[in-house]
Amino acid sequence: MKLFRFLWWLLVESTFRCSKENSRRNTPLTSKDHVSKHQLIVMGKIALYGLMTFLGSSLSLLIGISVYMFTAMSFAYSLMNSSALVLCLSLLAIFIDLGIVPKIEGRGQKKRKLKYDPIKYARISVVMTAYNDEASVAEAVIEFKNQPGVEEVVVVDNNSLDDTATRAREAGAKAVTEKKQGYGFACMRALREAKYDPIVLVESDMTYAGYDVKKLIAYLENADMVVGTRSTQELLDQDTQLNWFLNWGNFFIAKLLQLKYWGKIRLTDVGCTYRAIRRDALSKIINQLKEGGMIFSPEMIMVALKNNLKVIEIPVSFRRRWGRSKGAGRSNWAAFKIGLKMLLLILTL
């Protein structure tokens, strides 16, 4: 019963947090502004906690069945019963959150409209993060500078120990140094350094292709931010750092994030740096970005969704990395630890 009470508390706590967050909003909801910044955001969060509870209770049920088959202990029987009850309640919570709540909230509201805001004369800022990338940064700068519409390439050197900044300047980029160590700090500095509109964020390790810039900008006509996904196998080199563990782990975390913001986004990859954003959209979220480490990418997506920006995910090419990976690609253990941090972020942000 203690397990049951704990898991049920998680569901109640998620509802309380959502209600508390909504109570901080000053303007009351009306049918006219249901898609504005004052929209209720309960839908999806309960389902997210319900899914986590379902997975935990399923594991508990399997353990109880296994123990009972071999020992017939009364403890195992109680574990089976309580796990089955929690499992059913979690499924009910998911059904109510995703099946019934949207219909209730949707009554009298306007239907979601398709965004279409063409970018006729795009002057693109390409901003890159770099850390000990002297072997690749010059090639990356040249490749992106040669793309149509690119007005500038900015490289943010995150305290490299080699000649990354020098190679970037020699290739024609503006190079600046971000003293705060961390992938997220480098990304935030890069976004702040951009002068033009729209802005493309990418890494300087040659894993991403310059020719995909036009693809990102094309979809930006229908969105505020376009993020890449490396989940399309036909667009991956055979010897990339994305092994089966990274692929499936990334996909799992992405679907949890999608569940939290149910109906707002379709997501398959939370670790892809490659993205494009409109300047006016960036101005709405840049001061809300806080994560300085490796979980900056999902944080930026979540902050954008919380501010009711339209985010679209599209497939991008992904190539073999030049040099050594400093993030999740280092090892499966490093990827696992980053994944746990992403999971905690999704549950708490």
Image (tube, rainbow, N blue to C red):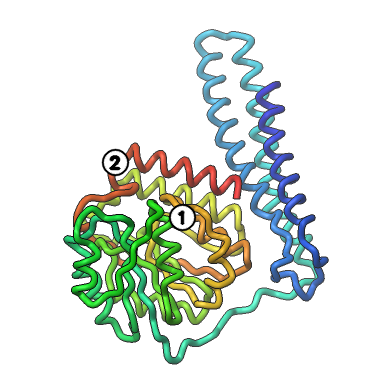
Mark 2–mark 1 Cα distance, whole angstroms, equals 19 Å
**Category of crowding for the residue at label 1, using alpha-carbon neighbours closer than 10 angstroms: few (below 14), some (14–19), many (at least 20):** many
Picture disc at residue 83: none
Question: 83 or 38, which is in the foreground?
Answer: 38
Secondary structure of residue under mark 2: loop
Q: Is residue 67 above or below residue 178?
A: above
Give the x, y percent position of residue 12: 74, 39
Tell me the kind of residue under disc 1.
Phe
Q: Where is residue 284 in the image (x, y as percent from the top left)?
A: 59, 70
What residue is drawn where x is 33% and y is 49%? 327
Report the residue marked by disc 1: 296
Residue at the spot 64% in from the left edge and 10% down from the top edge: 74
Classify residue 336 as left or right of residue 60: left
**What residue do we see at 73% from left, 53% from top?**
21
Q: Observer-nearest residue: 200 or 98?
A: 200
Classify residue 162 as left or right of residue 90. left
Left of 88 or right of it: where is 25?
Answer: right
- Local crowd at mark 2 within 10 Å, few (<14), some, or many (≥20)? some
Q: Residue 331 carries which label?
A: 2
Residue 344 place in picture, x, y as percent: 54, 43
Identified by mark 2, the residue type is Ser
- Horizontal and vertical percent position of residue 129: 34, 62
Give the quarter of the figure containing the N terminus: top right
Q: In this view, does 219 lie to the left or right of 56?
A: left
Mark 2 / mark 1, whichever is N-terminal: 1
- Quadrant of the rendered structure where residue 88 is? top right
Secondary structure, mark 1, is: helix
